[in-house]
Image (spheres, rainbow, N blue to C red):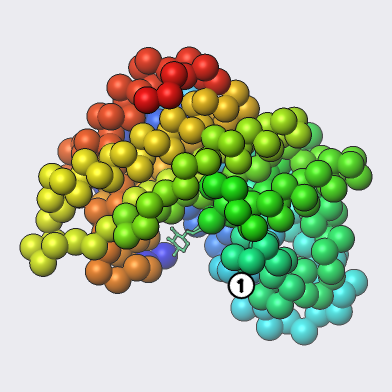
Amino acid sequence: MPYENPFYAEPEYRKVLATQFSSVTPENQLKWEFVHPEQDVYNFQEADDIVAFAKANKQEVRGHALFWHSQNPEWLENGDFTADELRAILKEHIYTVVGHYKGDLYQWDVTNEIFDGQGRLRMQENIWLRELGPGIIADAFRWAHEADPSAKLFLNDYGVEGINAKSTAYYELAKQLLADGVPLHGFSAQAHWDMRWGMPQDIEANFQRFDDLGLETAITELDVRFTLPPSGIPTQDQLERQSKYYTDTLQACLNVLGCKSFTVWGFNDTYSWVPVFFEGTGAATIMFEDYTAKPAYYDMLAMLKDATPGKSPRR
Ligand code: XIL
């Protein structure tokens, strides 16, 4: 991880985590490179600690992620395995990891980021698609469902919040998987916004078409980055504009009945992937470094207080 894990070291982080949220997602701890660092080694300790913490605080946990082109261990990416071996490796991993948390995780991102911006499957970057072909997607869902029949299984990606080529590729894939009887239960959008660009106005319409297929929807990784002034301190105007991105995203989710899971990606600016990955930007979360709340926090809280899921009046 590019920054220290505050979960063990910072009491204030744990206090806010325990009291402000009803669902938590391990940000890295269930990714292949963390949970399966060597072919015959699984490391569940850090994710186990999060799950135990969540249970103690009556929170639900989302699992992220089982099938991705990124954050895979060396032994896997450079292993020179045959197709048969890879298939067995993926099956064993899914059975082992999903099985380890059977009954504990309410949702799993089975696949993450399998399409590119044009709505084409990432046939080269994704080792599973490259070596095993698109049919492996259905198998991954089947294996995850066998390992934990109670977990809701999701297709997750970024850039699929509104209606566009990429989200439409997901819509077509979802229809096909459902027609084939594959245990697919949800479609989710990460929602990593950048204030240099506006946000799509058709998130609700996009989610609704998946809802109409009988799928749940979710916002899984919401944050809102922008270019910081030279002082490094966001202006009031920036914070208010940021809040609108947060509340518009929340409103879209509230307006769709099956959108039952809504997650921010980090909750204070100290522990956010944004400044590490997008140079010059930051302040993307709902709390400052000292955990004081930003307008986005208060405005979402007010919206949640008034909300009737699936029936919220448009603002
Ligand atoms: C990021 C984490 O936040 C970082 O700590 C890590 O170094 C890289 O990954 N989409 C995803 C997440 O699905 O897993 C990514 O998380 C952010 C983009």
Q: Is residue 207 above or below residue 279?
A: above
Confirm or reject: label 1 Cβ below 8 Å from ligand 1: no
Identify the residue shown where x is 59% and y is 48%.
163
Q: Nearer the viewer, residue 150 or 242?
A: 242
- Residue furthest left as drawn: 231
Would you name the residue on which mark 1 appears? Answer: 73
Location of residue 232 by image quarter: bottom left
Q: Nearer the viewer, residue 102 or 299?
A: 299
Q: How many marks?
A: 1
Identify the residue shown where x is 38% and y is 52%.
198
Q: Is residue 114 left or right of residue 29?
A: right
Residue 12: x %, y % from top left: 24, 40
Identify the residue shown where x is 33% and y is 30%.
300
Which class describes the residues within 10 Å of circle 1: few (<14), some (14-19), or many (20+)? some
Residue 209: x %, y % from top left: 68, 36
Residue 164: x %, y % from top left: 60, 54
Q: Quadrant of the N terminus?
A: bottom left
Identify the residue shown where x is 66% and y is 75%.
125
Q: Is residue 130 above or below residue 243?
A: below
Q: Is residue 1 left or right of residue 131?
A: left
Q: Name the secondary structure under disc 1.
A: loop
Q: Quadrant of the C terminus?
A: top left
Q: Nearer the viewer, residue 203 or 231?
A: 203
